[in-house]
Image (cartoon, rainbow, N blue to C red):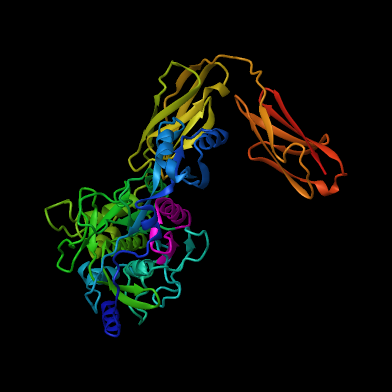
Amino acid sequence: MRVTRYFATNLLCILVLVIVWGSHSPSSLAQEYSNHHDGQLLVQPKPGVAAEVLKRIFSDQEALEEDELPEINVKILKVPADKLEKVEQALSHNPNFKFVEKNYVAGAATVPDDTKYTSEWHLVKILAPSGWDLTRGTSNVTIAICDTGVDSSHPDLVGKFINGYNVYSNTPDFNDVTGHGTAVAGTAAAMTNNITGVAGLGWANSLMPIRMSDGTGYALYSNMAKAINYAADHGAKVINLSFGGSGSSSTLQSAVDYAWNKGCVIVASAMNNNTSAPYYPAACNHVMAAAATDSTDAKASFSDYGSWIDISAPGTSILTTTRGGGYGAWAGTSFSSPLVAGLAALIFSLNPNLTNSQVVDLIEKNATDLGAAGFDQYFGWGRINVYKSLLAAKGSSTTVDVTLPTTSITSPSNGVTVGGSVTVTASASDNASVSKVDLYIDGKYFATDTTASYSFLWNTASYANGSHSLVTKAYDPTGNVGTSSTVTVTVSNQTTTDTQAPTVSITSPKNASYVTGMVTIQLTASDNVGVTKVEIYVDGSLTASLTSAPYTTKWNARKAAKGSHTITAKGYDAKGNLGLASITVNK
């Protein structure tokens, strides 16, 4: 018996709640920061740059590393708001970084909808009921909903959740703060054939709810990247992003590449401005950008368009789950995207051996062609056709990828002489995709780069003068490895004896001051090459030995005798040069 009888009958009993979602007001991120965070930058150091070098660079620019995205080697910097442009420009010209960019703000792709539909027309339009005769999905294929959270107690969603998280506050509480994420989740995979509410396309697929927005429904790109990385690391096969921002972003592209190389299909909404201007992450490489169609298979009036659109799906009057346990009609490319995501999950469920590239290909090649023949800027490759895509997936044969990636070192050239800090660049390509490139120096692993263009910063001063070999290895998601030809270079650096001692200063407590109780001892240390160690002594006894800033320790003056006491700081560099500072305090 076809499932249409179940969900069509049940829908007659639904009290339709109409959701009006226009501008979010008040909007802390959108109003406070316009289209980007006024006090943050996102930077990606080149592989091989030492942590101490980064600290010095950031300190010189009055920037503080506030957080990081370790999966893609991106640092989140706190920068004085009045110096944001200046610091961005300075770091952009620094050869230690691959990219420097603002932390943009993204919003949900939803428009007001006041039409009350009492049936899920969109599921019939895309031939979902016929597709469900082939598969209803499997619980081991998970769709990540990176959004405003999801109502954890909704009767049509509860029991479907796996590995939910809140990257905005770094807590397990993924509950919805605006209702948008709950509506998106229901569109993708609400429980079906359960005599309750609505039907989701990914009938039996699991959901991974990830809250990435603030309380008003806006998300920084850094949090969106965190959500993508989290989903890829915690078992999602499909990632849905019904959000978008106008700023292009290397950080988002790095996160998307990370997920793609882990085998995920990533789908994003095209946004709702009826413009050809690209929005991100939809316009990123390896993302399926979903435009919206209406019930007549025409372009939805609000849907964005352009050469960056890949696919289209219904996006007007979509009946779905709402926060608080209800149901309502929503509109926007926010709801086209989860339909594409749901189809991807069904394909993975039917044929789990398919790669993400094959799944994308099946969706695009089996779409119902609309508009101009073939690809066009309004519908991409067409409107999704669930039955046709699943029928093709059922008959698809999976072949083992044995093609090796190719890689070569493009700079420096073979036989040249180098010195100081050298940027090593490499090219890499593969029939599927390149997941990472490793650099080896003299046969020893040096560093990894996961995003093209592949480059590494090599401090040749750490190597002896003479001949050294460089080799890159490129990997694809299957694990195939391609190795470059060896490039041999001659390192020639002036060998000078470092005789300059570090400069050390005790900043707290002050000389001749009176102390009592637990005393915080703080000092600064710098060197022309680098400080390797700082030692702190009280009355000649070693109190602390520190190898990195901040140089601070505690001294329990309660146990000290009354009278004067000497605090001494010693700073060392790699050559053993010693810098001293000393003060006297009284108890």
Q: From this viewpoint, which residue is outermost toward the right?
A: 561
In the image, what residue occupies the spot 50% across and 27% down?
458
Q: Is residue 239 magenta?
A: no
Q: Which residues are magenta?
A: 206-235
Horizontal and vertical percent for residue 560? 85, 45
Task: Please name whichever residue, 354 or 318, is drawn nearer the observer in this view of the structure.
Answer: 318
In the image, what residue occupies the spot 39% across and 64% down?
216
Task: Judge whether 329 appears above or below 334 on screen.
Answer: below
Horizontal and vertical percent for residue 128? 26, 69
Q: Is residue 338 visible?
A: yes
Residue 145 figure quarter = bottom left
Where is the C terminus found, in terms of image quarters?
Answer: top right
On screen, residue 124 versus residue 166, left or right, reads left
- Report the number of numbered marks: 0
Task: Please name whichever residue, 581 or 397, is drawn nearer the observer in this view of the structure.
Answer: 581
Task: Judge whether 196 appears above or below 207 on screen.
Answer: below
